[in-house]
Image (cartoon, coloured by chain):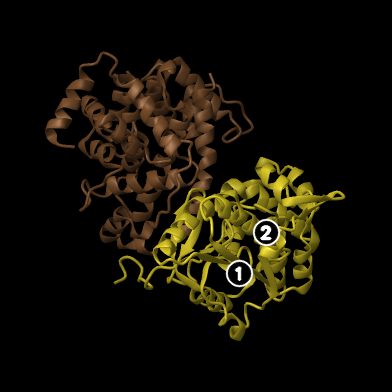
Amino acid sequence: MPIDSTVLANERVPVDALTDPVWTRIRDLIYQVSGIYQAENKFHLLVRRCNVRMKAVGSRTPREYLDFLTERPNRDAEMRNLLNEITIGETCLFRSMPQVEALRKVVIPSLAEVKRKLSYTKLRFWSAGCSTGEESYTLAMIMLEESQKTLKGWTFEIMATDLNERSIAKAQEGIYNDYAVRNVPPDFKKKYFTQAGSNFRVADCVRPLVTFSRLNMLDDSKMLFMRGIDVIFCCNVLIYFDGKSKTRTVNHFYNALMTNGYFFLGQSESLYGITEKFHLVHFPGATAYWKPNEPVLKAGSA
Amino acid sequence: MTMETFDRLRSRITSIDSMPTIPVILRPLLRCLDQPVEQIDITRIVELISYDKTIAAQCVRMANSALFGRHKQVESVRTAVMNLGMWRVRDLLFSNSLSQVIPANRWIVDPTVFWRHSLGVALVCRKFAEILGYPDTEKAYLAGLLHDIGILVNSMVAPEEFRAAFSKATREQIALDEAERATMGFTHCDSGRVLAEAWKITPDLIQAIELHHDIGDPVRGGPLVAMVHLSDLLCRLRGLGYGYYEPRQVDFANERGWLYLVMQFPNLADLDLARFTFTLDEYAKEVEELVSTVFTR
């Protein structure tokens, strides 16, 4: 629950507690399994999250916890619990401003430029693993803004899918608490939300712009139907997949994207070792994977 | 820039009284550091530091800071140097003495922003050198640290023009060298070369200063230039730039500098660039600590 992470955020971790070299091994293990990277300057967060799990499983030291995390039979379940803990409270509207800025200032203008030349004025987005809809509505609000400024007369489509039907039902309601809207810029909050008691409801002009549906990303037959997308967001979902499923799903994403399309992961997630078809591209404060004209071999490997 | 234009720029810059002069401590320090790590004379470095009360105090303060502070209070310069490590002391000395190159009221770019960027590029450049197996990692560090010294020259010798160029870059969200070229007819890379030559800095460092924005096609100047170029780009994309948003997309694996380095050091092709990028955020803390030590008077 989001409230937990507020409590956790206020809990201070003593500097000495961060110096145990086992944390680095836990960090590397998490990266190897999930692709999520915890930079050393964020170790206090990693330690807090691990402390929660250590209490839950009764580990007294980081070393004991590392053993618990790597030994059968508990390792898979515990890694999932830890990943849940790490990504807890991450879901909110306008979660990553660098990603939002990259989308508005670089990605959309560059896609629009290519499409204008083809006299095609439509953009399609897919929020894969949309959970309770925060990311999808963020996209809708950004596109509403753009359609009044740089993309007048354009149409856009936002598909949002998730495995969990309860999440989808909640997403469709579009009602969020204070914590979920904490990053929303004030002018967006004023324009695109209405107060509903102590909560905020996504405005009627925004909600119809997103089509929510249930989709299992491991269902090949369904994934094959997703085509012609310009930008895919899939944040902190693939981290739960094993290597094979991850590769298969990322291949589906690749095929679903138009040439020149973009694939955004969570802010510290990477596709290293999963596929080399995409190009990793950098924007200020954010990275994404870009689909080139032809899959290109890695530099130097020709 | 043609030779003739460059000569004109050089005489314009060097004839101005306000041309930055090399800080007293810097020449012996550069000499001291321009030798293999194991031959560096710590006693000489401690002696150099002790000449300058401000720097000596900063070393002691930093050694006692949260990042390095241990249980026992550090009081002597020598202990501070030993606790901080040779390279952090060197960072302090450089940042401090170079900050004194121009008076506080003549900075056009915020000096803390300038140092954050220079130190960030230095750290990333050294990391690149380590990954590549480039033989002189400290040279790479120094090249990163000094790459933008042309900004100091521009602030001193052409303040109004440079102010206009910097404000154009910020306003139009374009690279600084592009704005300088449009406004001033020369860039901090050109003026940096003039200063580096006047200070008699080694030729490979001069090339890194001159070519870090425009590395040439084919790449001029060798791996050091390419490393500084890429480190500069990475820092600008990871919050250690000049404090304004540059809306751009960089595909590093297809950057000319990257492709050049892959040819020279094939192991670069296997680098997990995403992870490397995420680790850059770790430098921010180190950079902050140093910058706040130098600028807290």
Q: Residue at x 22, y 34 (%)?
A: B202
Res. B205 mark: none
Question: Circle 1 is placed at which residue position?
Answer: A238
Q: Residues within 10 Å of mark 2 (few under 14, many from 20)?
A: many
SS at mark 1 in the image: helix
Q: Residue at x 58, y 52 (%)?
A: A148
Residue sitting nearer the eye, A261 or A18: A261
Q: Amino acid at mark 2?
A: Tyr
Residue sitting nearer the eye, B71 or A90: A90
Q: CA distance from mark 1 to mark 2?
A: 21 Å
Classify residue A162 as left or right of residue A112. Answer: right
Residue sitting nearer the eye, B227 or B60: B227
SS at mark 2 in the image: helix
Colour yellow, chain: A
Classify residue A235 as left or right of residue B226. Answer: right
For this orientation, the residue located farthest to the front is A153
Residue A226, relative to residue A3: is it above or below? below
Residue A94: x and y in percent read 65, 52
Q: Residue at x 54, y 50 (%)?
A: A149
The disc numbered 2 marks a residue on which chain? A
Q: Amino acid at mark 1?
A: Leu
The disc numbered 1 marks a residue on which chain? A
Q: How many numbered marks have been drawn onto this rendered protein structure?
A: 2
Question: Circle 2 is placed at which residue position?
Answer: A137
Residue B51: x and y in percent read 40, 16
Residue B57, relative to residue B167: is it above or below? above
Q: Are marks 1 and 2 on the same chain?
A: yes
Colour brown, chain: B
Q: Residue at x 45, y 21 (%)?
A: B55
Q: Is residue B38 visible?
A: no
Res A64 → quadrant = bottom right
